[in-house]
Amino acid sequence: MNSKSLPEIHATLGTLLRRPYEYMSVWLYAELAKLGFDDVRPAYSAVLRNMPLGGARVVDLAARAGMTKQSMGYLVDQMQAAGLLEIAPDPHDKRANTVKLTARGEEVVNASIELSRQGEAYLSTLVGEGKIKQLRNILQEIYQHLEESGDGRK
């Protein structure tokens, strides 16, 4: 009996993109834990990837992440409790709050970026630096086309 799923058997582009991402994600969060960030969950990446430098309202973070406001609010609450985010009144809208990274949250982002670079360097040892650069260029080109055409989620 074959234990592979249909997308794995057919090697769809989605599978080929997702599997390496999943491997890198598992590795990155294990490495973050070794650095003392063992309370940082993969789900938090929806916030961390979409957080502007000056902070954002929950509704704006949710829109950027393609999530409901309620789901984003849940993550924000968890991350605030973990000391990764702070919530303050929005200076432009007294009815709203702004979410910002704490110093610890910034440490997690910086560590994640450095670990991502290390992961990319490791992949270069597997297939060669030239192929990784080529892959990056192709993915950036696809991303740019999707953003320009409005076909992306955001």
Image (tube, helix red, strand yellow):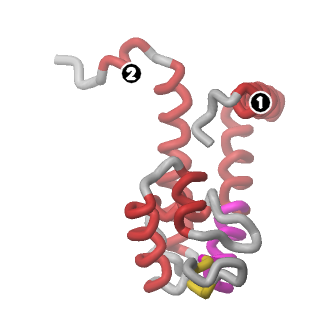
Kindly identify the amino acid type of the residue bearing the numbered disc 2.
Glu
The disc, 2 or 1, on the residue closer to the chain's N-terminal end is: 2
Q: Nearer the viewer, residue 82 or 132?
A: 82
- Which residue in the structure is indicated by mark 1? 148
Question: As drawn, which residue projects farthest toward the top?
Answer: 10
Question: The residue tagged with tag 1: helix, strand or loop?
Answer: helix
Q: Residues within 10 Å of mark 2 (few under 14, many from 20)?
A: some
Can residue 39 be seen in the rendering of this structure?
Answer: yes
Mark 2 → mark 1, Cα distance in angstroms = 30 Å
Q: Does residue 85 show up?
A: no
Q: Nearer the viewer, residue 11 or 130?
A: 11
Label 2 sits on residue: 8
Q: State how many labels appear.
A: 2
Image quadrant in which you'd find residue 28: bottom right
Residue 127: x, y in percent?
70, 29
Q: Position of residue 32 (x, y in %)?
A: 55, 69
Q: Which residues are magenta?
A: 99-113
Q: Is residue 115 above or below residue 149?
A: below
Q: Quadrant of residue 110?
A: bottom right
